[in-house]
Image (cartoon, helix red, strand yellow):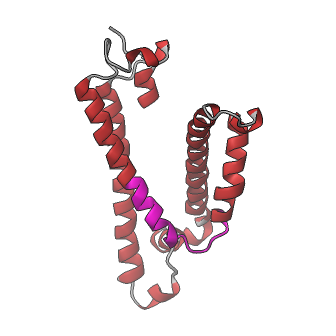
Amino acid sequence: TAYGMAAAGGTGPVLATVILVVFGLLSWYSLVSFARAAEYVLVRGGKDSQDAGESLSAVWERTLPNGKLTTYIPDLGCVCLTVGCLLFYSSFIGDLFSSLASGIPGLPDLLKKRWTIVLLLHAIVIRPLCFKNDLSALKYSSMTGLVGIFYTILFVGKRLLDKSYAKGGKFYELMSEHLQPAD
């Protein structure tokens, strides 16, 4: 939505906000619904609940008729979601770091290419994370990322109020012409 707004692709601020709010509400609803189902099935489920396991498949199996035959569906959904998030993460980080790397003087051209950065990211960071059994150590970097998001929101709000990127602002001419706001 942000790129669509910047590139004047038809996504205005109202539509972009609506899209973000709708997806946020869908995510919230999905997580709350799963938590309620898991609590009911796994905690209040009676004597068999100890043997049910603590997974989405266990909840699926115990709540649906013939659930045992279709437990692959929630597992496949989790895999697809994870792969989709990984692709999004990879393209976002690849674009960001290739732009940053292009500004480093003396860096070999090969290390400035997007595909090289994505491959290095997967080899050095993502692949080792995929083999960890416990990701609780990531909670600190996640909190740092959350602080970074709030900082970004404040900074973007400041730039919006001081009109740095508006026509005549101090950063207007530094933007690519196709990203400059329409008059």
Residue depicted at 41% across the width and 58% down the height: 144
In magenta segment, residue 131: yes
| Quadrant placement of the C terminus | top left
Instruction: Tell me if 97 is positioned left or right of 33 in this view.
Output: right
Q: Is residue 27 visible?
A: no
On the image, the x and y values in percent for residue 152 come to 36, 42
Question: What type of secondary structure mainly makes up the magenta span?
Answer: helix
Residue depicted at 49% across the width and 16% down the height: 176
Nearer to us in this view, 156 or 74: 156
Instruction: Tell me if 141 is positioned left or right of 85 in this view.
Output: left
On the image, the x and y values in percent for residue 159 come to 30, 30
| Quadrant placement of the N terminus | top left
On the image, the x and y values in percent for residue 156 come to 32, 34
**Picture quadrant where residue 87 is located:** top right
Residue depicted at 38% across the width and 54% down the height: 146
Nearer to us in this view, 46 or 21: 21
Nearer to us in this view, 10 or 96: 96
On the image, the x and y values in percent for residue 24 come to 35, 47
First to last magenta residue range: 130-146
Relative to 81, residue 7 above or below: above
Q: Is residue 138 visible?
A: yes
Relative to 82, residue 15 above or below: above
Instruction: Tell me if 124 is positioned left or right of 168 in this view.
Output: right
Instruction: Tell me if 102 is positioned left or right of 150 in this view.
Output: right
